[in-house]
Image: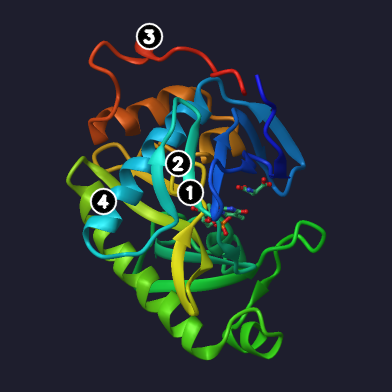
Amino acid sequence: MAKRRKLYEGKAKVIFEGPEPGTVVQYFKDDATAFNNKKKGTITGKGVLNNRISEYLMLCLQDIGIPTHFVRRLNMREQLVREVEIIPVEVVIRNIVAGSLAKRFDMPEGTPLPRSIVEYYYKSDELDDPMISEEHITAFGWATPPELDEIMSMSLRINDYLSGLFLGIGIRLVDFKLEFGRLWDEDQMHIVLADEISPDNCRLWDVKTSEKMDKDRFRRDLGDVEEAYQEVARRLGILPESGPGDMPGPDTLQ
Ligand code: TMP
Ligand code: ASP
C-alpha cells in the first residue's frame, strides 16, 4: 500500500497529504496531552469518537452558514479537509468560569459569566500558548483587523448555536477553543473554521449533575474518560445503536 506523506504531527492529530490538491487528511490519534505536553496518556477510542463528534458538529455549523475546512469523513479515524493556512491564534470562548479563568481570578468554577468572554492565545508550544490581545494579533500581523472581526463574530455565532445544541441534550457548554484558517478560492481569501470541535477542546458539563464530560477528566485524573466521550457521542445520536462495541479499533494507515 502506498504510504502517504506526513505533513505535520500534532499532539492529538496527524496531517497527511490529501488525495487531491488543496486537501489534507486529518488522522485522529488516541494520544492525550495536557498542560502543554507535561502530562501524557492514551484514551482508548478517543480518536474514533473525536472524528465522529467533530464531523457532526462541523456539518451542523456548515448548515447554519459557518464556513469550515471540513469536506467529509473518510473512515473511523480520518477526515478529508481543505488545506488552509492556520492562523496561529487559539480563540477561547467562555460562558461559565472554569479552568485557567477560575485560577487567574481566584473565582469558583461554575460561576456563570454575565456575558460570554472571548480570549486569544498565541499558538506556540515553546512559549506555552501565552494569552494575547487583539493588539498583539494585528501588530504582529497574525491576522488583520477585518480578519479578526470576522473571527470574533463567527466565534460568537458558533457559541450561540453550540450552546443551544448541547443544552438540548442536557449538556452545558462551559467553554471551548476554536482555530481558524485562510482558504484561497481563485484570488478570494476566506476565513474558515478549522481544526476540530470535540471534548478535547470543550468543557462540557452534565446539566443535572454537573459531571464533567470532557478532557478535564484526563487533566484532573477523574477516571472514566473514554466513557465520558462516548456519552457525549451517544447523546448527539452518533454512537452505533449497540454501543461502542460496534466501533472497530484503529484503522491502519495506508
Ligand atoms: P483553559 O481554561 O485551560 O484556558 O481552557 C479553556 C478552553 O480551551 C477549554 O475548553 C479547553 C480548551 N483548550 C484547548 O483546547 N487547548 C489548550 O491548549 C488549552 C489550554 C485549552
Ligand atoms: N492541548 C494542550 C496540551 O496538549 C493543553 C490542554 O488541552 O490542556 O498540552
**Residue 185 image position (x, y, % from top left):** 46, 71
Residue located beneath label 4 in the image: 60
**At numbered mark 3, what does the secondary structure look like: helix, strand or loop?**
helix
Depth check, front residue: 126 or 219? 126
Q: What residue is drawn where x is 33% and y is 63%?
A: 159
Q: Amino acid at mark 4?
A: Cys
Residue located beneath label 1 in the image: 81
Depth check, front residue: 67 or 165? 67
Q: What residue is drawn where x is 40% and y is 59%?
A: 68
Label 1: how many residues lie within 10 Å, few (<14), some (14-19) or many (20+)? many
**At numbered mark 2, what does the secondary structure look like: helix, strand or loop?**
loop
5 vs 81: above or below: above
Q: Amino acid at mark 2?
A: Pro
Question: Is the shortest distance between ligand 1 and the CB of mark 4 under 8 Å?
Answer: no
Depth check, front residue: 164 or 26? 26
Determine which of the numbered discs, if any, sits on residue 222 in the image. Answer: none
Instruction: Give the quadrant of residue 124.
Output: bottom right
Determine which of the numbered discs, if any, sits on residue 199 in the image. Answer: 2
**Residue 118 image position (x, y, % from top left):** 46, 73
- The Cα atoms of the two marked residues, 4 and 3, are separated by 26 Å
Residue located beneath label 3 in the image: 245
